[in-house]
Image (spheres, rainbow, N blue to C red):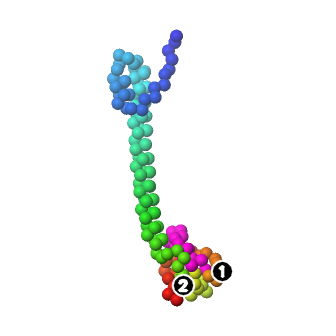
């Protein structure tokens, strides 16, 4: 039987380091291969740790964003009647009544106009709860 190449699937650098030290078991070429594999495992572990840290930060940021959105979404109860004000691009809607639908995208909120049931996205300053 001739020599066969065997794939060593070890992921523990301590085991690989111990194997490299066993010069009585491995040829210099095998030792070089083990040393190279040890470096690859360490690089992969470093990359995995960086990725895990990034994912943890993204998860924490998403949690903070969700809390902020919940805080902003509690501006008023869904279904509350609001009156539109301070609109510049659609001034004809100023004074119109609408139903507060909730949080929209970014810093906007969605309201449904009474006049035509159209939903529009507005900044907080462009509507207030109707006291009528």
Residue 116, labelled with which disc? 1
Magenta segment boundaries in residue numbering: 99-113
Residue 110 x/y as whole percent: 56, 74
For the residue pair 71 and 61, the one nearer the viewer reads as: 71
Mark 2 or 1 closer to N-term? 2
Q: Are marks 2 and 1 in contact (CB under 8 Å)?
A: no
Residue 94 x/y as whole percent: 57, 86
Q: CA distance from mark 2 to mark 1?
A: 15 Å
Name above or below for residue 108 compared with residue 33.
below
Residue 51 x/y as whole percent: 44, 47
Circle 2 packing at 10 Å, graded few (<14), some (14-19), many (20+), is: many
Answer whether residue 109 is visible to the viewer in this image. Answer: no
Name above or below for residue 93 compared with residue 13.
below
In the image, what residue occupies the spot 52% across and 10% down? 1
Q: Residue 115, located in which quarter of the rendered image?
A: bottom right
Q: Is residue 91 left or right of residue 13?
A: right
Q: Is residue 84 left or right of residue 116?
A: left
Q: Which residue is mark 2?
A: 83
């Amino acid at each position: 039987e001739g020599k066969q190449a065997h794939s060593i699937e070890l992921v523990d650098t301590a085991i690989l380091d111990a194997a490299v030290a066993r010069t009585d078991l491995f040829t210099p070429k095998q030792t070089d291969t083990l040393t190279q594999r040890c470096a690859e495992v360490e690089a992969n572990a470093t990359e995995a740790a960086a990725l895990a840290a990034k994912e943890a930060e993204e998860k924490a940021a998403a949690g903070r964003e969700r809390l902020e959105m919940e805080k902003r979404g509690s501006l008023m109860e869904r279904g509350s009647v609001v009156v539109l004000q301070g609109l510049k691009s659609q001034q004809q809607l100023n004074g119109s009544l609408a139903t507060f639908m909730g949080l929209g995208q970014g810093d906007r909120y969605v309201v449904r106009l009474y006049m035509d049931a159209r939903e529009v996205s507005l900044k907080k300053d462009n509507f207030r709860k109707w006291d009528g």
